[in-house]
Amino acid sequence: MYIEIKGLTFQYKNAKEKTIKDFSINVKKGEIISILGESGSGKSTILRLISGLEVPSGGMIKINQKVMVDDDTFILPENRGIGMVFQDYALFPHMTVAQNIQFGLKNMSKKEKNKRLEEALGLVNLEKFHDRYPYELSGGQQQRVALARALAPKPSLLLLDEPFSNLDKDLQCKIREELKKIIKQTGTTSIFVTHDRDDTRAIADRVVVLKNGQMIKVGNPQNIIDNV
Ligand SMILES: Nc1ncnc2c1ncn2[C@@H]1O[C@H](COP(=O)(O)OP(=O)(O)O)[C@@H](O)[C@H]1O
Ligand SMILES: [Mg+2]
């Protein structure tokens, strides 16, 4: 299995009970998994654990046979090869589109960086937007820059945290389709979390339903969502 998560458990220091309880999932290479749950169910916390921003109290995460975290190992976030897209896009406001996308490209020649930039911009159809600043872009365009920035380093895993919640409904539908197409085109294994069933239905190959930090169901979106 490409991604293996086993028995992940976590509690915030000031919390009364465990935030994540015995969470396990295996993900195939190229698969898009959606974690569907209400606000406060622990979705963002799971992504923080996977990316290495929090340390679990128990459990194991492996990516491509390599242990990222377990009782003996902790790989730093910057060494995990994970790309992230956040709800608010988190673009650097003082950097252009090109600078934003190239920011995460390390240990590469200038030529290689430029090639990756062009590829990433092409992927999201923003070839002519190199020199724009985030405030000069629409919400949908900022979202695409955030995706291009996450994909440019060719991550082994892409994590998306409610990536559509800041977009209006019409745009949301269009961007969902686009996002799925782009992710599938690059073959990037992805986990995206959302409280919105329509997001899950449109994008996910498989869905995990999360409640109070616990997985309550997993399976095909069509079968699961109608019965949540
Ligand atoms: N830094 C923190 N310290 C303490 N509790 C937190 C912290 N971040 C989130 N929580 C709590 O953990 C639970 C899960 O939060 P979160 O993972 O953000 O849920 P979701 O993304 O599904 O809305 C919530 O009850 C939230 O209040
Ligand atoms: Mg959240």
Image (cartoon, rainbow, N blue to C red):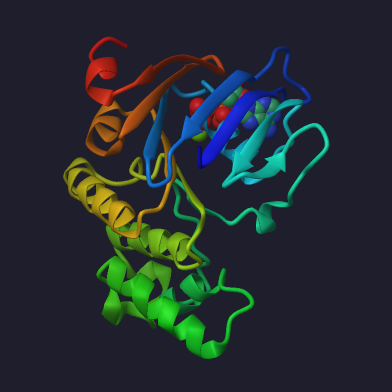
In the rendered structure, the answer to whether residue 96 lies left or right of residue 78 reads left
Q: Residue at x 68, y 52 (%)?
A: 77
- Ligand 1, what quadrant? top right
Asked whether 109 or 101 is in front, the reply is 109
Residue 173 visible within the image: yes
**Quarter of the figure with the C terminus:** top left
Q: Residue at x 33, y 61 (%)?
A: 144
- In this rendering, the answer to whether 153 lies above or below 73 is below
Asked whether 96 or 83 is in front, the reply is 83
Q: Quadrant of residue 61?
A: top right
- In this rendering, the answer to whether 126 lies above or below 216 is below
In the rendered structure, the answer to whether residue 223 lies left or right of residue 158 reads left
Q: Residue at x 38, y 47 (%)?
A: 30
Q: Quadrant of residue 146?
A: bottom left
Q: Residue at x 32, y 67 (%)?
A: 137
The image shows residue 114 at horizontal and vertical percentages of: 45, 85
Q: Residue furthest right?
A: 72
Residue 161 visible within the image: no
Asked whether 45 or 171 is in front, the reply is 45
Q: Residue furthest bottom?
A: 111
The image shows residue 205 at horizontal and vertical percentages of: 30, 34
- In this rendering, the answer to whether 93 lies above or below 14 is below
The image shows residue 149 at horizontal and vertical percentages of: 46, 65
Total count of labels: 0
The image shows residue 34 at horizontal and vertical percentages of: 39, 33
